[in-house]
Amino acid sequence: MNTVKVTLCLFFMLGCGHAFAAKKKPCFKPLSSCPLRGCAKDDTPDAFSNISKHNLDPSGEVKTLSFGDFEDLQAQVEKKFDGKYATMTKPDRTRLRNLTAGGEKVGEGSLVQIVGFIAVKPEKSKPHANSSGESVNCRLPGTDNNDFHISLTPKAGGSEFEGIVVEMIPQKRNENWTTQRLVKAEQENRAVRVTGQLFFDNHHKVNNDPANNIGNQPKRMSLWEIHPITEFEVCTKSSCDANDSSWKPLEDLEQGGHS
């Protein structure tokens, strides 16, 4: 009898599991009707995060950051919040603005840029659309309605584990910013210069150890991102530094690669 009960319980649990795992429907459509808070309720931590992700007008003069700066900014947040930042109130997010990098004041909402390379490792790593539908974009499916997730590393041929994440949002995205062009830059080992808002993705965990990969967590050594991206440029020489004149806008790059 006990065996039968266990079997029946397992049967119904598995059956119900599919229902519980069912994908949530979009909360607004089309994308133009999606509020800045996305699907989050007003004045909630998720709403504050979603609103921050939409900031296409970051403040101040552009500051060039290194990958070391992103690692240092992560350490500052760990200390400031004692590692407890999964849920952030509006005042918490304000505290993210008062940090330093390279001797300069910087924080969430600052206009920054970084030079790096699109990650090629682990195998099959490539820029992609978060097409499953996220709260920030009202859970709408499809490439045109979602962010482009790009992993940057300090050196060509690098791994996502040693890099950071930068994202292009669908709102006002240049129609020639395509995953095909991004993949082309990746395959050609081109240096890229990314400019946009400095943003702290507090909903995730640092995932920088290939030997202890944290499932369902983006691979990266810092939760600080450039999100949204306002400019994405590709080096036209064998190498470029941040102040080089040989940067070409992604939208002018010849289409290539695979989506």
Image: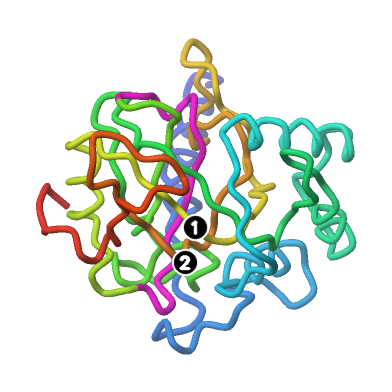
The outermost residue toward the bottom is 33
Direction from residue 251 to residue 22 in the image, left or right: right
Residue 257 disc label: none
**Secondary structure of residue under mark 1:** strand
Q: Which residue is mark 1?
A: 195
**How many tags in the picture?**
2
Which residue occupies 29% across, 30% down?
120
Disc 2 marks which amino acid? Thr
> Where is residue 227, by image quadrant?
bottom right
* Figure check: 243 above or below 206: below
* Figure check: 158 above or below 43: above
Q: Which residue is mark 2?
A: 230
> Where is residue 73, by image quadrant?
top right
Q: Residues within 10 Å of mark 1 (few under 14, many from 20)?
A: many
Q: Position of residue 52 (x, y in %)?
A: 66, 67
User: Which region shows up in magenta?
Assistant: 157-173
Do labels 1 and 2 touch, CB within 8 Å?
yes
Q: Position of residue 161 (x, y in %)?
A: 47, 25
Q: Position of residue 29 (x, y in %)?
A: 42, 85
**Secondary structure of residue under mark 2:** strand
Residue 44 magenta-drawn? no
Tell me which numbered mark, 1 or 2, is placed earlier along the sequence: 1
Disc 1 marks which amino acid? Thr
Q: CA distance from mark 1 to mark 2?
A: 6 Å
Which residue occupies 45% across, 52% down?
194
Which residue occupies 36% across, 45% down?
192
